């Protein structure tokens, strides 16, 4: 299976979530047979895992780049800009695959739900560790709690994604991000 098949599956999961993406719809969106999907990926859950990897590398690579920003404010600005850009692209479903993909699932989808919890927690941990470095480097005040600041930022970013999925437009989301960044702690 090529990247284009994975991209089609990603868009389908992104639009319908894990539970809402039935095998028939997935294979139709991918342009392959059910037999080919199972031969290439094993099952729907394994396909979703590959899709989440692709999502992280493809439409959602901004986190890794944001963490390279020289200041905490630069990191926060880049994360929120990336969130807004990724969740409001005209040719993609609005919202975030990693946030909405499996917020609620039946028992059979619990592993995917857990996978997405881990995915979100890994993002939070990366931001927390980066903010700890900015405290250590003197970019943020010594009294700053990097864990709390990272949790605040990632929670806000996920909230932006939910608002984008609800139809809030890019300009309004940017206004919200700007308001949050105006209260950013400075050293």
Image (spheres, rainbow, N blue to C red):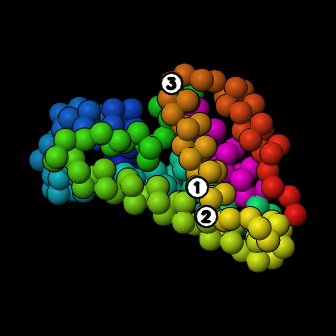
Residue 81 belongs to magenta span: yes
The range drawn in magenta is 73-88
Alpha carbons under labels 3 and 2: distance apart: 28 Å
Instruction: Please identify the residue farthest to the front as the structure is shown.
Output: 143
In the image, 147: left or right of 95? right
State the image coordinates of residue 173 (x, y, percent, origin top left): 67, 31
Front disc: 3 or 1: 1
Q: Which residue is mark 2?
A: 147
In the image, 4: left or right of 169? left
State the image coordinates of residue 61 (x, y, percent, origin top left): 57, 55
Can you see residue 31?
Answer: no
Residue 41 belongs to magenta span: no
Alpha carbons under labels 1 and 2: distance apart: 6 Å
At 62% from the left edge and 71% from the top edge, which residue is drawn? 129
Q: Earlier in the sequence, mark 3 or mark 2?
A: 2
At 74% from the left edge and 41% from the top edge, which residue is drawn? 180
Q: Are marks 1 and 2 in contact (CB under 8 Å)?
A: yes
Q: Earlier in the sequence, mark 3 or mark 1?
A: 1
Where, quadrant-wise, is the C terminus in this rendering? bottom right
Camera-nearest residue between 135 and 101? 135
Query: Could you tell me which secondary element the residue under label 3 belongs to?
Result: loop
- Magenta span: predominant SS is helix
Q: Which residue is mark 1?
A: 151
Camera-nearest residue between 130 and 27? 130
State the image coordinates of residue 132 (x, y, percent, origin top left): 68, 72
Front disc: 3 or 2: 2
Camera-nearest residue between 66 and 144? 144
Alpha carbons under labels 3 and 1: distance apart: 22 Å
Q: Which residue is mark 3?
A: 166
């Amino acid at each position: 299976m090529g990247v284009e098949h994975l991209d089609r599956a990603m868009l389908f999961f992104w639009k319908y979530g894990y539970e809402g993406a039935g095998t028939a719809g997935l294979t139709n969106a991918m342009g392959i047979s059910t037999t080919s999907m199972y031969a290439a990926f094993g099952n729907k859950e394994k396909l979703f895992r590959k899709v989440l990897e692709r999502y992280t590398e493809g439409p959602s690579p901004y986190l890794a780049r944001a963490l390279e920003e020289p200041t905490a404010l630069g990191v926060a600005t880049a994360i929120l800009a990336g969130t807004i850009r990724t969740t409001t692209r005209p040719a993609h479903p609005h919202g975030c695959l990693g946030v909405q993909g499996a917020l609620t699932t039946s028992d059979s989808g619990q592993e995917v739900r857990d996978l997405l919890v881990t995915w979100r927690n890994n993002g939070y941990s990366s931001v927390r560790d980066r903010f700890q470095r900015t405290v250590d480097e003197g970019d943020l005040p010594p009294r700053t709690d990097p864990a709390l600041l990272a949790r605040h930022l990632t929670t806000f970013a996920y909230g932006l994604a939910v608002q984008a999925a609800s139809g809030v437009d890019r300009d309004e989301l940017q206004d919200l991000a700007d308001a949050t960044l105006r209260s950013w702690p400075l050293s």
